[in-house]
Image (cartoon, grey):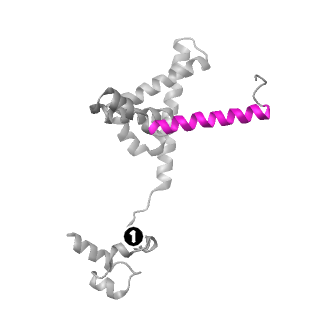
Amino acid sequence: MGAGLAFASFLRRCPDLPAKTRKSGVKLKLDTLTPDDYEKLSKPFVPSRPVFKNCIRAFLSGGLICLIGQGIQEAFMAGFDMTSKEAASPTVAVLILISVILTSLGVYDKLAQWCGAGTAVPVTGFANSMCSAALEHRAEGLVLGVGANMFKLAGSVIVFGVVAAFVVGVIYAILGFGGGHL
């Protein structure tokens, strides 16, 4: 179907347009539409999003990533006689390594397509964002490509985290919740 026929079909199915415009399909100028008019015209053609299904997928996939992380931590605790606190850092490092490997192989993006936000929330999503930016710009060289572009997406997260931690620390120090170590 050509673009003209598709547009004419679109106009005929829009009940908010005058009858003359719907029948002829040529008297409407798209550049004169207001945003509200455009929204009214396009609303019947926008597919509904399966919000509940997406939430369930995100919950299950994020939980599965955390379950895998817990299994890795338990393995460190059993295999290397570590406490829970000692095993936390190597567990995060292994999860980051797995995420980078899956991103490099192109598997993580396919998982994220199905899982949605479940793969973006844990530390693996942060590692994926940095690795995918580095892979995307590797042709430009190590310094100007990988080094300069790796933190573009993740940099804002790092800055926000540092600023938020500083503000919360200052508030805790002022209110006296800091443990008295000033």
Image position of 47 with respect to 32: above or below: above
Query: In the image, residue 74 lies at what x, y percent?
Result: 54, 21
Q: Quadrant of the C terminus?
A: top right
Q: Is residue 49 magenta?
A: no
| Circle 1 SS class | helix
Query: In the image, residue 109 lies at what x, y percent?
Result: 36, 39
Image position of 99 with respect to 81: above or below: below
Q: Nearer the viewer, residue 178 or 18?
A: 178
Query: What residue is at 46 percent from the left and 23 percent from the top?
Result: 94
Q: Is residue 170 magenta?
A: yes
Q: Nearer the viewer, residue 38 or 13?
A: 38
Q: Nearer the viewer, residue 26 or 127?
A: 26
What main secondary structure does the magenta stretch of the protein show? helix
Q: Quadrant of residue 83?
A: top right
Is disc 1 surrounded by few (<14), some (14 to 19) or many (20+) residues within 10 Å? few
Give the residue furthest to the front.
144
- The magenta region covers 153-176
Residue on which disc 1 sits: 42
